[in-house]
Image: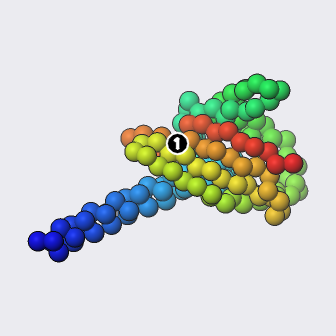
């Protein structure tokens, strides 16, 4: 009887770990596709919109105040910058290092470091919710490294 209970505990515990691992991968995929590749590395606007919820706002700490930056304003600025870029402009790749992914039910947070040319540029704190269509980014704060 004890052996049977032990087997059940192992099976259900492993299933829980697998589910958590699967959800963690799903969260990382959204952050990578929409934010790291989409926004930071000049990826698809479609991928950005797919990964960011329409109500998203980046909360910027400026002049001892918090100033929201909605996703549509950010996308407009990206599109303008891309349209004004010279064809021979070198795109410097941004690389990401996931420091932490924390998931509780339908809420998740990600702590992420961004690097350009080997130099740490930002530490981001990204918040996601799991909607019926999947994980989407709903908020972000950050620290810009000097």
Q: Is residue 105 left or right of residue 47?
A: left
Q: x, y (%) of residue 56?
A: 59, 33
Other-residue count near label 1 (Cα within 10 Å), few / some / many at <14 / 14–19 / ≥20: many
Q: Residue at x 87, y 54 (%)?
A: 89
- Report how many numbered discs are placed on residues in the image: 1
Q: Is residue 64 left or right of residue 45?
A: right
Comparing 1 with 108, the one in front is 1
Q: Specify the quadrant that holds the N terminus.
A: bottom left
Q: x, y (%) of residue 71?
A: 64, 34
Q: Is residue 31 left or right of residue 121?
A: left
Q: Secondary structure at mark 1?
A: strand
Q: Residue at x 65, y 53 (%)?
A: 112
Comparing 38 with 10, the one in front is 10
Q: Which residue is mark 1?
A: 128
Q: Is residue 140 left or right of residue 20?
A: right
Instruction: Say if residue 33 shows up in the picture.
Output: no
Which colour scheme appears in the figure?
rainbow
Q: Residue at x 17, y 75 (%)?
A: 3
**The image quarter in which residue 68 lies:** top right
Q: x, y (%) of residue 117?
A: 83, 62
Instruction: Say if residue 36 shows up in the picture.
Output: yes
Comparing 88 with 114, the one in front is 114
Q: Residue at x 87, y 48 (%)?
A: 146
**The image quarter in which residue 72 lies:** top right
């Amino acid at each position: 009887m004890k052996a049977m209970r032990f087997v059940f505990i192992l099976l259900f515990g492993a299933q829980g770990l697998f589910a958590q691992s699967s959800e963690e991968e799903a969260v990382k995929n959204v952050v990578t596709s929409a934010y790291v590749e989409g926004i930071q590395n000049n990826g698809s606007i479609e991928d950005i919109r797919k990964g960011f919820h329409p109500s998203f706002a980046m909360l910027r700490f400026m002049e001892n105040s918090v100033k929201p930056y909605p996703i549509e304003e950010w996308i407009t600025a990206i599109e303008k910058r891309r349209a004004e870029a010279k064809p021979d402009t070198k795109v410097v790749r941004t690389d990401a290092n996931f420091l932490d992914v924390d998931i509780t039910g339908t809420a998740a947070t990600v702590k992420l470091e961004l690097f350009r040319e080997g130099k740490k540029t930002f530490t981001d704190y990204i918040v996601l919710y799991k909607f019926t269509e999947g994980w989407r980014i709903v908020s972000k704060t950050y620290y810009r490294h000097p």
